[in-house]
Amino acid sequence: MGPARDGIRRPPPLRRRRPARKVFWNGITVNQTLRVATYNIHKGFSFFKRRMVIHELRERLRALDADLVFLQEVLGNHERHAERHYNWPAAPQYEFLADTMWQEYAYGRNAVYDAGHHGNAVLSRFPITRWDNQDVSTHRFERRGLLHCEIAIPRWSQPLHCICVHLGLFARGRSRQLEWLRQRIEKLVPADAPLIVAGDFNDWHWRHKATHELAHPLNMREVFEFVHGAPARTFPAVLPVFRLDRIYVRGFRIGLAHAHHGNVWARISDHAVLTTVLERI
């Protein structure tokens, strides 16, 4: 991976393998269904960064029992936080959260600063066979990336393509990022391959521009639009108003789609977490 636009050479995303295990839901193996979650974890801090909540966050994630987890605002390292908090994990957040629950993980470093760095991560119960982090920053003050993983699901004829995204705050930049994302999918993901694109789209527009500019041209469906008629309200987590987070899929039947918010979840991030159950077509 070449030098980023800020001149910093970024190493490839990291992953770690542990022995695989088979999981069942009501007697149905995960070879047929997948439970997927996406969550902006706010760097492991509560709303307004009042408390460090990474330990509680790990327990909440484990309770979701997801096969694949798409995470945004994940700290790979932060020396000042490590010095300030006595119980700060020794491992990077993506490794600490994966623990023994997810056998593999990939991390895409986006923002680099004096104290450390943060980015997106994918946690998986299945082997991550390929991964890449594409820099889609539109200016130097807001570093963004697309973490693209290929995952081998037992008995599936093709790898599952997963892209974890965190788009910019400004509409013009988001439109460019959506275009780059669309181009990447058209170039690298076969039309008949299973695909999940999930994360924080920061899509404040009432017309849901990500759906019109990305999903419709690529024949993808947003799971909450399909199940409930509109994307989920995910921000702020205590009383969600804005529909910022999405799960777009292709090559799946969509089952349940749920947004986890309220006081319990608002204590550990400013975003709600989304989950869905998918069945491979």
Image: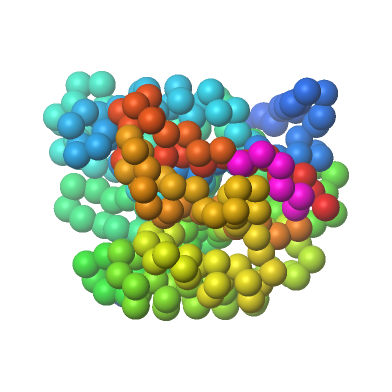
State the residue at coordinates (38%, 30%): 262
Asked whether the viewer can see residue 60, the reply is: yes
Examine the structure image and report whether residue 254 is included in the region drawn in magenta. yes
On the image, the x and y values in percent for residue 140 come to 24, 71
User: Which quadrant of the figure has residue 150?
Assistant: bottom right
Residue 131: quarter of image: bottom right
Measured along the vertical axis of the image, is residue 143 above or below residue 72? below
- Is 245 positioned to the left or the right of 228 in the image? left
Q: Nearer the viewer, residue 133 or 163?
A: 163
Residue at position x 82%, y 23% from top? Answer: 27
213 w.r.t. 78: above or below: below
State whether residue 107 appears in this view.
no
- Image color mode: rainbow
Residue 94 at what x, y percent from top left?
Answer: 43, 39
Counting from the top left corner in percent of width and height, residue 161 is at 66, 57
229 is within the stretch colored magenta: no
99, above or below 116, in the image = above
Residue drawn at x 26%, y 57% is 112
How many badges with numbers are in the image? 0
**Residue 226, placed above or below residue 67:** below
Give 86 or 177, whichever is nearer the viewer: 177
Whether residue 67 sits left or right of residue 78 in the image: it is right
The quarter of the picture where residue 154 lies is: top right
Residue 266 picture location, percent across and down: 33, 32
Magenta span: 252-257
Q: Main secondary structure of the magenta part?
A: strand
Identified at 79% across, 66% down, the residue is 192
Task: In this rendered view, identify the residue nearer to me: 223 or 1.
Answer: 223
Q: Is residue 108 left or right of residue 35?
A: left
